[in-house]
Image (cartoon, coloured by chain):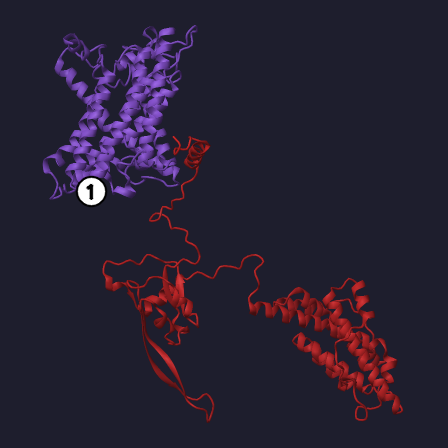
Chain colours: A purple, B red
Amino acid sequence: MTTFHATAFTNQATSILTQESWLVSLGLKVALVLGMFLVVPLVGGYLEHKTMARMQDRRGPVEAGPFGTLQLVADGIKFIQKEDIIPRAADRWIFSLAPGLALVPTLLIFAVVPLGPGVFALDLELGLFYALAIGSVSVLGILMGGWASANKFSLIGGLRAGGQLIAYELPLILAAITVAVQAGTLSLVGIVEAQATFMIPGTDINLWFGVPQFVGLAIFFIAAMAELSRPPFDMPIADSELVFGYMTEYSGMKFAMFLLTEYAGMIVMAALITVLYLGGWQPLPGVPLPGCEGTAGLFDCGLVGTLVGVGVMLGKIMAIVFVMVWLRVAYPRLREDQLQRMSWLVLVPLALVNLAVVTVAKVVF
Amino acid sequence: MATTSPPGIGLLKGLGVTIKHLAGRPSTQMYPKERPDLPPRTRGVIALMDENCTVCMLCARECPDWCIYIDSHKESVPAAKEGGRARTRNVLDRFAIDFSLCMYCGICVEVCPFDALWWSPEFEYSEYVMDEMLHEMGRLREWMDTVPPPPGLDDGAVAPAEVAEAIEKAELEQAKAIETAEAADSDDAKPEAKDGGGKSAEAKPKKSDIRVEGGEVDQEVYDQLIAEGKSERMARAKAKAAWVRKEKQRLAEEQSSSDDQTSDTDAADDSEATSDDDASAADDGASADDTDEAADEAAEAKPKKSDIRVEGGEVDQEVYDQLIAEGKSERIARAKAKAAWVRKEKQRIIDEGGDA
């Protein structure tokens, strides 16, 4: 096990951000992670606002900035200005820590998400494991917030969130494991690489993992929505029953942090889906990025190839966010028992069957 | 799994509906930048037409919120006629609606018997101070300028009572005018019969004095008119008139058969006069009076107007134009102008005959 520790969390591929001076490297990587963490969720949030509005025959934000693009920025400024209220009965320290504890794991996942060829902060050998493990920590922040608020709605919301996240962690991980089995690696960059080189057995036709593993894709997608507590799986928040669930007592910056966690989580999950199932930064199956032909779209593609790769990746992320919003608009919230039933009686068995089938297929071919 | 419905076609339908709406136009109205299009009977603010108010207090009493304040005093109005009684009249001093209390139920507008209260769609009168929501008479009167005209009737709706009445009246008038012209013609048709009609106006009952209960229809005339393509209503009316005329004729003949007859045309003259009067009443006396006078003058010496046959069919363009200018319907104008032409023609013939 000592060797495991020695190699598991070491860099595999080299990021283009890695420079000779470690300080510059650090600066660039922090800038990348923070930039992704603070900017991409805003874009996703704007997309959600607009898409949801238009699907409901509304206009959505129109006043702040051109076409309302700065609405979330304005919201952020508003949240900063707001009074930071802590209920008297609340457990002050835990109450204050909770939003940060929910936020930080999401921020940390961005460190391993590859945005393009060579555009990532870290490529861990256990990248997938790291992402899923760190992501599970968020539930602790939510539970703490629900408990420390000293509010029955918060408590019910927090417990619902706990139950939901535990229930859906399992199908999520089972689906991800199946991808790892097929790719033969836990490194996120490695999985993208594996997709670039995966051929239908006996042919030259390149496929992304989303096609052979469409069941896994569906399971991962549903589980990701539930992990994020997004409608139709938003029982922990359930405005009509629980006021605002575990966020009921939060205001100002702390509330903004919870909100940012949700949007950033959406981006993280969309990025994971893209990396695991939809070929990462590759424009089309079997079509490498310009400048990357030799290495099948891996690293060092030149400026154009890298930028196109990042664009493709962000485009796919936004497409998945769009689908999430679409489902949110179309479907009503599930009941708590339906939610649990769906996880334990449908998704988990399906994911196990999927894992078995893929494993057998992997051995056979 | 038993309680969970299998993901069916409904899930896809839901996605289809939402994606369709994504492409559709948002129904948002950009209110402060654009005026919203409000339905015609929007309850925005209540306007007061104070001239119509009789201070009956119905609105103030019916108001569930008691938000209408009315002050008034009585004035005495001197008698309109000599020896009459002086009347009292309510004069409105104050009429105010407190819109901070009003719940916009519209009962006051509904209950007002004299249409003094109206709904206006204006809604931009919010204030920073509650007191300013109390709109006094002047302000309420100003809202009157924003009251839209009532919306038009739906297609196929029943016409309002006054309008329906006016249409009916006009149709009757028109039928009468045509009938009169017809009657003049049919009178002329049998001058011999009339000549034998009565000896003198004093001695014998005139045709116009004979009362005949109407109600039957001259089937012959009716059939003929229908065959000519007249409307059933028109044919029935004319056939009835024809029956009445015939009946009168018959009665007059019966009476005159007892006395020895000398032909005097008084009866016919009278009937002619009445029909002329009708016509002139109908067409606001377009040249009918002169005709009448001339006819009376010529009564002894000249051939009677009623003896002259004039083929109808032409139209007195002058009269027609005048009637059209007065706003009469084309049908009525044409009928009256025809009658006027017939009268004129007869007059002309009489004048010529007199000269000869």
Q: Say which of A245 and B289 sits in front.
A: A245
**Viewer can see residue B261:** no
Residue count near mark 1 (Cα–Cα under 10 Å), binned few <14, some 14–19, many ≥20: some
Q: Say which of A289 and A6 sits in front.
A: A6
Q: Residue at x 13, y 43 (%)?
A: A87
Q: Residue at x 36, y 17 (%)?
A: A354
Mark 1: which secondary structure? helix
**Viewer can see residue A218:** yes
Horizontal side of residue B7 vs B67, given as left or right? right
Q: Residue at x 34, y 25 (%)?
A: A347
**Pointer 1 residue:** A152
Q: Position of residue A89 (x, y in %)?
A: 12, 43
Quadrant of the image occupied by residue B99: bottom left
Q: Amino acid at mark 1?
A: Lys
| Vertical side of B186 occupied by A117: above or below | above
Q: Position of residue A199 (x, y in %)?
A: 39, 9
Chain letter for mark 1: A
